[in-house]
Amino acid sequence: MLINGVRSLHTCCLRFPYTTERPLLRSMSCRRTRRRRLFPTFCSAAATANKERNAKVIVISGPTGAGKSRLAMELAKRLNGEIISADSVQVYQGLDIGSAKPSARDRKEVPHHLLDIRRPSEEYSVGQFFEDAREATRCILDNGRVPIVSGGTGLYLRWYMYGKPNVPKASPDIAAEVCSELADLQTNEDWDAAVQLVVEAGDPRAQHLATNDWYRLRRSYEIIKASGSPPSAFQVPYDNFRQECGSGAANSFQDADHSVDPHVNSSEEISSKELDYEFICFFLSSPRLNLYRSIDFRCEDMISGSDGILSEATWLLNSGLLPNSNSATRAIGYRQAMEYLLRCREQRGRSSPGEFYSFLSEFQKASRNFAKRQLTWFRNERIYHWLDASKPLENALNFIYDAYHNESGNISVPDSLRMKKDVSSHREVSELKAYRTRNRYFVRREDCADVLDWIGRTQTIHQDLPIA
């Protein structure tokens, strides 16, 4: 989108060639990180705690589709920076379109970290992200470059900045015992019985986990067996920091679906002086109606063509994975696409336009709802400066560049660039309530003919395929 001849922060979906036969290779930045792990003193031993605390780290977040990846790219070029992805889907190999991964060209131009580091059949936790992201930060700083953390996974960013809870790690014996106790229940897909088992063991919050989130359920059970206490019994650094800052009652969040306290004074910003690094944080968004329209168009882009999210979902199904069975297949877009394709396979590769449009609508709605939850989450994260993504990109770049070089520690967003955190006017509320999707490409029944033809050619019944 162009505004007065200058490209705005909104960018269209990145499209890259995709084939189901692609090998699952780790990225160059990941291989470089792995080599560094063989020599830990190269990254961490050289810097003292005081040096780290004085080091500056830029954090750029925002709801899905706001344009944070493009902003991070351009900023990295100006500041001689490297980007650390804080996206819970971009860690998975092969999930490129649905997670809007940076292109190969972008990765060559600016080093990226924590992309393509897990297979879709593997789990990746927020604790693992903390360790990997902190190591990448030390490596970037030791190389004399600027760390730029970019992503919209709120819990990843919270733990990254404030630290992770000191939860005991289960011994191999306990882990094997838990796995054995839950194995039959998982095989029989008896989620309710498994949850009840963990609730009775001592974690009532297990009943609030997302259905079939077997990884977190196992982890909760492991913690109970290792310590005698549920995960909620352990202090969260973020909550402690808020209490020390006098911010009132602290809330502990398990994931980005939980809401925040609407009564907290969100205009008061938290200083990062007591954290491990000097974090300079920005939250990029746009007026809600504009954001929703951008998300709807983005979903259309991801579906268009033969190399889009449907192709990636086909690859997941052909690998033996089922929708909603683990972190990768619960991701927005992939879950809906896999469920839709399974229905097509049950019908021997056939789909009506009505079924396609129902899938598209579900995908768009889930994406908008996710963006709404992100806005709710970050509204209470007072360390962030909110920027308007509908303004020219150059304005935001200049502001963040100056903020990084500002030694006073005082950052004030100009009115021309400031983004409101809340929908305040009655007119905006009414417009949001009346919002209806208006597609750009898929408008008439015949507009999805190419997609339906592709489904007919590719979604034959696949049986007895190995797990990825």
Image (cartoon, helix red, strand yellow):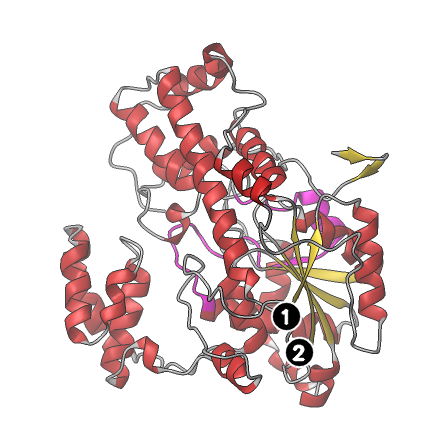
Q: Which amino acid is tagged 1?
A: Ile
Q: Which amino acid is tagged 2?
A: Ser
The region drawn magenta spans 99-126
Q: Main secondary structure of the magenta part?
A: loop
Element type where label 1 sits in the image = loop
Quarter the N terminus occupies:
top right
Mark 1: few, some, or many residues within 10 Å (few <14, many ≥20)? many
Reply yes or no: does residue 179 show up in magenta: no
Q: Which mark is residue 383?
A: 1
Q: Which mark is residue 320?
A: none
Is the residue under label 1 in contact with that under label 2 (CB below 8 Å)? yes
Residue drawn 27% across and 53% down? Answer: 212
Reply yes or no: does residue 110 show up in magenta: yes
Residue tagged 2: 272
Reply above or below: 411 against 423.
below
> How far from the left and from the top, in percent, is residue 437?
51, 28
3 or 76, nearer to the observer: 3
142 or 382, nearer to the observer: 382
Residue drawn 54% across and 45% down? Answer: 99
Element type where label 2 sits in the image = loop
Quadrant housing residue 292? top right
- Distance from Cα at disc 2 to Cα at disc 1: 7 Å
Quadrant housing residue 80? bottom right
Residue 312 in sight from this viewpoint: no
